[in-house]
Image (spheres, rainbow, N blue to C red):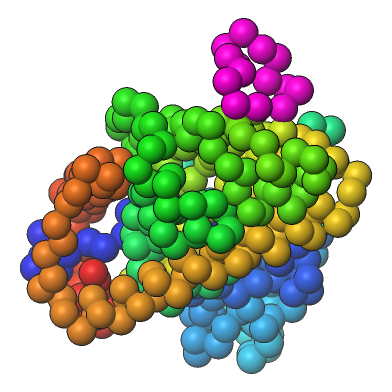
Amino acid sequence: MTDEKKIFLDNCWYAAAWDYEVAEADNKLGRTICEKSIVFFKAESGVYTALDNRCCHRAAPLSVGRIEGNNIRCMYHGLVYNPDGKCIEVPGQETQVESLGVRSYPVVEKGHMLWIWMGDPALANPDDIHDYLPLSDPDNWCGFPRQSYLHYKANWLLVVDNLSDFSHIAFVHTNTVGGSEEYAYVSVPEELERLDDGFRLERWHYNSNVPPYHAKVIPENERTGKVDRRNLVEIRVPGLFFMETLFAPAGVDIKTQDIGQYRQYRNCQFMTPETRNTTHFFWNYLRNYDMDNPETTKSLQASLLEAFGEDKAIIEEQQKLLVKNTSFDPRFIKADKALAHFRRIWKKKLEEEEQKYPTKPTEESRHRIL
């Protein structure tokens, strides 16, 4: 053990990039995940590869290299690396050195998302990836023409905290996805289902006004009616958020109804640490109605971006204050029940991993995480 504290989980699957991000970057993309610079590339075979983005010779970035078949060539001195990270060619040098190479990471594509495993490759099981099925089901769910990405100048846990806490919706998002401050007072949270890697939670807002973002995309004669709004939320380690939203006419017993007849949304958000103080945020918002109307898609995307902007402004200001005052001790309220559970689970997993794989001190690890 060392005196340094582990700040990221290694043995888990992180959302790393949408497939189109790699395609649009000439089939290779440099991205920092958990303070490690990684190059992702799509080989001629169609298989994705993830390697340390640093040539072992002179530390040139492989993300500005050239894909050759299933390999990538460093464009500083021409070293070629295969998908395992082994250097298989050094121009002008007949004898190959076995020790030349870079680290390779398990990477899997599911639901148009590239998932990376930062820890022990022997533990990487693709079946453990929380693949979000609506992303791969265009017959039943319509999302955005391309999956979305935002960058937060804040620690990823602050973003997860925000999504774990529905009471903030009434105040931060009154004019977007919330609808009124009433939501914080009268919406009904069901019992929290505690999982060993996160939680599930159901929340109802009965006899409520239609929130602004939804009112913009439904017929005018329905906008003033009352609805019962249900949100089913699931958040998993390391930072995976899934939500089912249903709007039904107020008073309808959905347990006896075919809920497929009502307007529904499916929301996925993936928070991945870039550094201890910055976060990759991947998301999409899908629906089961009006699926051939691009105007509905544009309206929903604009509304959600506005709402995320409201979150982002507060969270990034939180980050600034917490950096200035690292001794801040937060106080918890009743609405933080889910948030507190997630934090405990994450801390427990971090401690268990630290015991098995003690942290090696690095220059980066000398800086404090929130």
Which quarter shows the C terminus? bottom left
In this picture, residue 238 sits left or right of residue 100: left
Q: Nearer the viewer, residue 227 or 291?
A: 227
Task: Answer left or right for 220 relative to 120.
Answer: right
State the image coordinates of residue 336 (x, y, percent, origin top left). Answer: 26, 47
Q: Which residues are magenta?
A: 249-262
Is 234 magenta? The answer is no
Give 335 or 19, whichever is nearer the viewer.
335
Q: Position of residue 185 (x, y in %)?
A: 35, 43
Q: Nearer the viewer, residue 279 or 297?
A: 297
Q: Position of residue 287 (x, y in %)?
A: 73, 40
Residue 21 higher or lower than 358, as above or below: below
Taking the spot 11% from the left edge, 64% from the top edge, the residue there is 329
Q: Is residue 105 left or right of residue 118?
A: right
Q: Residue at x 78, y 66 (%)?
A: 23
Query: Image height check: is 125 above or below 253?
Result: below
Residue in the picture at 72% in, 33% down: 263
Looking at the image, the residue that sits furthest to the right is 292
